Image (tube, rainbow, N blue to C red):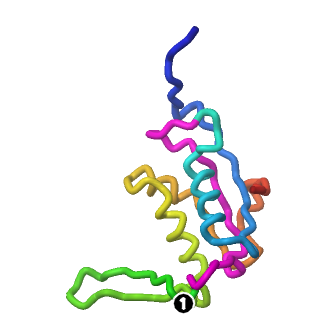
Amino acid sequence: MNNTTYSAKKSDIQRKWYIIDAANKPLGRVATEAARLLRGKHKPTFTPNIDTGDHVIILNCKDVVLTGKKLDQKVYRHHSGYIGGMKETTARVMMDNNPEKAMMLAIKGMLPHNSLGKQMLTKLRVYAGAEHENQAQKPEVWEF
């Protein structure tokens, strides 16, 4: 019986492209599935300290659903670093003006908060509409 732990090597990693259609689905459910794919947790070769994930394309972010009272109560905050530099935006305004950013921030928060997470985030493409520019990569539709 072999009791060694498997650790993926860069040469072993096979990357695929997946499309997730976010229309009429909750933002958090889409984000968790995308983070899972970006991280590579759906693969048997998952290794926590190596980026084994796939590329993810998310379409129709403008049609994503926020449940409950989140549209009015959820607040996105960022700070410029200067005194009085706090900027606040409600989820309703964010979804009207920039739905891609709302999806990107949700997924970013679910990835590791280090250089590995930044590397995983580069494999994410988010689009507000149904068109995307990655037909050449032959992406597969991911159902969850």
In the picture of the structure, the residue carrying the numbered disc 1 is 72
Residue 100 spot, x, y in % from top left = 59, 76
Question: The magenta stretch spans which residues?
Answer: 46-70
Residue 87 spot, x, y in % from top left = 37, 88
Q: Residues within 10 Å of mark 1 (few under 14, many from 20)?
A: few
Name the amino acid, label 1: Asp
* View extreme (front): residue: 68
Residue 37 spot, x, y in % from top left = 62, 51
- Please name whichever residue, 10 or 1, is drawn nearer the observer in this view of the structure: 1
Above/below status of 143 relative to 88:
above
Left or right, residue 1 beside residue 65: left
Total tally of numbered discs in the picture:
1
* View extreme (left): residue: 83
Mark 1 element type: helix
Q: Residue at x 75, y 67 (%)?
A: 21
Q: Quadrant of the C terminus?
A: bottom right
Above/below status of 102 relative to 115:
below
Above/below status of 94 relative to 61:
below
Q: Residue at x 47, y 63 (%)?
A: 109
- Please name whichever residue, 13 or 102, is drawn nearer the observer in this view of the structure: 102
Would residue 48 be counted in the magenta stretch? yes
* View extreme (top): residue: 1
Above/below status of 113 relative to 49:
below
Left or right, residue 87 beside residue 102: left
Would residue 62 be counted in the magenta stretch? yes
Q: Residue at x 78, y 56 (%)?
A: 143
Q: Quadrant of the N terminus?
A: top right
Q: Residue at x 60, y 36 (%)?
A: 13
* Residue 35, quarter of the rendered image: bottom right
